[in-house]
Structures are given as C-alpha cells and as structure tokens.
Amino acid sequence: MAILTDITTTAADPQTGETTSKLDQSNRMIQKLRQKSGTASMTDKKAKDEAPAAATKTDIVLKKLKSAKGVTIHTLMDATGWQAHSVRGFLSGTVKKKLGHEVLSETGKDGQRRYRLVETKTAG
C-alpha cells in the first residue's frame, strides 16, 4: 500500500501552484531533459537504423510453391526447419484456409509428391 500512496501523493508545483502526482512530475522532468539535450527518443533512432525485415517462413514457403515444377515436402522442411506434419498443416491451414490459395498436389514420374500454387485466371 505504501507504493500506491507514493505514486498518488500530490505535491505543489512551485511555478503554477497546481498539485500533480509524482509520476507526472518525473515525466515532465524527463521531457525537459530531452529538450535540453536535443536528442531524439530511442524509438526514433531504432526506426531509422533498422534494416528491412528478413523474409518470413510464410514468404519462403509461398515463393517455393509458386515455382512451375512445384516443391516437395523435404525441400520445404529444409527451408523452414519444420517437421513433415508441420509443413502439411501449414499448407492446409494457413496457405489454403487463411490465405485462400489453391494448392495442387501431384505425384511426379519420380514418385515424389510435389505441391504448387494454382494460378488463378483473372477476368479482364
């Protein structure tokens, strides 16, 4: 209860005569210090210094599925680090259901199953 009392305790502001919480006073002090030093906030610096985000696993899988030959489960496993059941679940749950892509599954002459995205024809 002592912590709550410290935060809600009010003190008189000598310049305006108003009462403010200690939390408000500390926020004002921080703002004044920033203004005096002329430095930007940390979030401003981070936003400028960051490089573009790396490709996500979703992006990687979709890129491989767009190839004309298609892609095998083992290739997707190597690219993502997932197990086979996770890749199949991702294809069914995320690619088909959430993203709304149509995934074609074919068995090639070599006997391996390959997955690829079906190109949708647009009217126009």
Image (cartoon, helix red, strand yellow):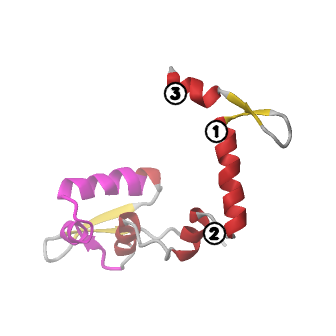
Image quadrant assignment for residue 123: bottom right
- Mark before the other along the chain sequence, 3 or 2: 3
Q: Nearer the viewer, residue 81 or 70?
A: 81
Q: Nearer the viewer, residue 10 or 106?
A: 10
Q: Secondary structure at mark 3?
A: helix
Residue denoted by label 3: 3
Q: Along the horizontal axis of the image, is 68 left or right of 39?
A: left
**Which residue, as the protein is rendered here, is positioned at the far front?**
14
User: Separation of disc 3 and disc 2 at Cα?
Assistant: 66 Å
Image quadrant assignment for residue 16: top right
Image quadrant assignment for residue 101: bottom left
Which labelled disc corresponds to residue 23? 1
Q: Which residues are magenta?
A: 68-96
- Mark before the other along the chain sequence, 3 or 1: 3
Three-letter code for the amino acid on which mark 3 is drawn: Ile
Residue 107 in the image: x percent, y percent? 21, 68
Q: Secondary structure at mark 1?
A: helix
Main SS of residues in magenta: helix
Residue denoted by label 2: 123
